[in-house]
Amino acid sequence: MMREEKIDQSVKNIRTNLELVNKRIVEAAEKAGRDPDEVKLIAVTKMMPVEVIKAAIKAGIRCFGENYAEQAAEKIEAVGTEMDLEWHMIGHIQSRKAETVSRYFDMVHSLDRMKIARYLDRYAKEQNRVIPLLIEVNVSGEASKYGWDASDESSWPNLADQFRQICAYHNIEVRGLMTMPPLFDDPEDSRPVYRKLRRLQQFLKEVVSESDWKELSIGTSFDYPVAVEEGATMVRIGTEIFGSRPAV
């Protein structure tokens, strides 16, 4: 009985937090003159146990983001595939985990190098599917960030050549871009990073016609209203919905 009460309280807390997050997304979109329906909320369950995911499903969440392929695969198996859920890979992909990613995830946000593009295309072909994905770029130039270095705008034509090669694969489909800004104290400091990403997006729309480059995966619990104002079509929210992650 106590366990059921705990689950019910968890569902209630998640639902309350989710309503607040959605409200802030709507406000940010309207402030920017955008349709809030253009923004997809991805609930990040990295390090969260299966019980939290099940509570989130009861609270109405259907789109989840995970960072670690093997942990995610275990959670997906535990939750089951009967429900209409979306699983998004948002973390760095190790070469040896590419097959797992191709099997379990509906979309990849973190394609950060050419070798992984080859692996994902190969494994997707074996499974007779096409994986939609986003190319991760590093527009801030911060050394600790993954992704193609896009900090120097003079390098963008060379990037375009590489991205055109990725678009030529048959079993992966490039939908847009993802980036992670540096860790700032003020969410407003993310705004120049996101604006630079939008300039790159527009550049790629003009020179790489093999993709429409529609999607921008930017914004976390820290700065998602700013990200929505700057064109995010996907925001990745964890702690604002679920609270702090469990200690490991």
Image (spheres, grey):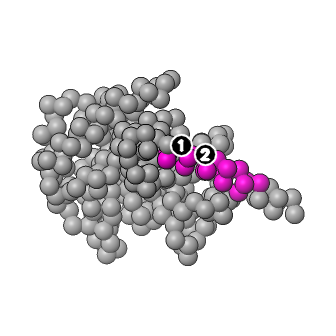
Camera-nearest residue between 100 and 231: 231
Picture disc at residue 24: 1
For residue 174, what is the image quadrant?
A: bottom left
The correct choice, above or below, for 72 with respect to 194 in the image is below
Give the residue pinned by disc 2.
Answer: 20
Quarter in which the C terminus is drawn: top right
User: Crowding near pointer 2: few (<14 within 10 Å), some, many (20+)?
Assistant: some
| Residue stretch rendered in magenta on the structure | 9-26
Q: Residue at x 16, y 37 (%)?
A: 156
* Dot 1 and dot 2 residues touching (CB under 8 Å): yes
* Amino acid on which disc 1 is placed: Arg
Question: Residue 16 location, x and y as percent?
Answer: 67, 50
For residue 118, what is the image quadrant?
A: bottom left
Magenta stretch holds residue 16: yes
Q: What main secondary structure does the magenta stretch of the protein show?
A: helix
Work out whether residue 197 can be spotted.
yes
